[in-house]
Amino acid sequence: MRKGIENFQTKLRLSSSLMDIYPGIQAKSHEEFLYQLLKDLDKERAEKRKIRNLKNAGFPLIKSLEGYDHSQITFPENLVFKELEDLNFSKRKENLIFYGGVGTGKTHLAIALGIQAINQGKKAVFYRLHDLINLLEERDEKKVTRLRKKIDESDLLILDEWGYLPLHQEGARLVFDIISACYERKSIILTTNIEFSRWKGFLFDEKLTAAIIDRLIHHSHMLLFTGKSYRMTHSLMN
Ligand SMILES: Nc1ncnc2c1ncn2[C@@H]1O[C@H](COP(=O)(O)OP(=O)(O)OP(=O)(O)O)[C@@H](O)[C@H]1O
Ligand SMILES: [Mg+2]
């Protein structure tokens, strides 16, 4: 009988832990047994999905909201920190723009929110803007198609270090392409220390810059990171 169950488990593509789960289930009826078994299998599958999504997200580091000091962030009137934690902006497909000086915790908060989204069963992907453009310019078309699909299937796109390095004309066009594809379909978190009026300086093209800003800010919240560099104040050299 055990061998038969194992065969069905493979044939029906059920988790191999089925064999470990079912003997431990206490149930008063067949229905309760079946319900508990399916529930446990579903829970296990969700956990595996989270681990896979975390691996695929491309976070350079793991950061958490726990212990994160947000006292130096100026929030817009219609947004409080709790709303960020609850990812309400993401449910509404709104964007967040994190603007502030170096070392003020922009990347940290962006990663922590991305991980929060994954823990809630969503997909998040993280790229430094420049890295993403390089990946999109890859010659191998299959790789580019996979990348676009990955972004397309995500719920939250994090673009870090926006404008830290200048782009070329084609790079700016690719940025527009991505922003345009995400517009009103998913949330973007963008971190930058470049104010809007200077975006043309790294995107070059005036029309493209205006079109990108227009799409980004339509449904977005700007958070100002006003503190001193965390790196500087917590430096060992101090
Ligand atoms: N409010 C905070 N609470 C806890 N740790 C923080 C906070 N702000 C920053 N840090 C830590 O300080 C370091 C620098 O932060 P982070 O990399 O997020 O800065 P940044 O704003 O992205 O800077 P840059 O513009 O240079 O990329 C990180 O190790 C981060 O974990
Ligand atoms: Mg950063």
Image: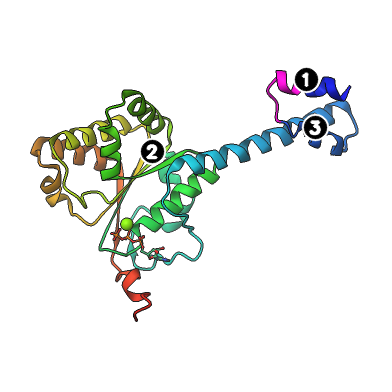
Q: Element type at marker 2? A: loop
Q: Which residues are magenta?
A: 7-15
Residue at figure coordinates x 40%, y 45% from the top left: 89
Q: Which image quarter: residue 95?
A: top left
Amino acid beneath label 2: Lys
Would residue 117 be visible to someone looking at this image? yes
Q: Are marks 1 and 3 in contact (CB under 8 Å)?
A: no
Residue at figure coordinates x 12%, y 51% from the top left: 198
- Which sits earlier in the primary sequence, circle 3 or circle 2? 3
The residue beneath circle 2 is 93
Residue 16 as seen in the image, left or right of residue 128: right
Q: Are marks 2 and 1 in contact (CB under 8 Å)?
A: no
**In the orientation shown, which residue stands out farthest toward the bottom?**
238
Where is residue 28 shown, x and y percent of the image? Answer: 91, 33
Residue 66 or 126: which is nearer the viewer?
126
Residue at figure coordinates x 18%, y 33% from the top left: 173
The residue beneath circle 1 is 7
Amino acid beneath label 1: Asn
- Which sits earlier in the primary sequence, circle 1 or circle 3? 1
Q: Nearer the viewer, mark 2 or mark 1?
A: 1
Q: Is residue 6 magenta?
A: no
Residue 122 as seen in the image, left or right of residue 14: left
Where is residue 190 shown, x and y percent of the image? Answer: 30, 48
Residue at figure coordinates x 25%, y 43% from the top left: 217
* Marks 2 and 1, how far apart at CA: 44 Å
- Is the residue marked by circle 1 packed among few (<14), some (14-19), or many (20+) residues within 10 Å? few
Q: Image quadrant for the C terminus?
A: bottom left
Give the quadrant of ligand 2: bottom left
Q: Image quadrant for the N terminus?
A: top right
Q: Element type at marker 1? A: helix
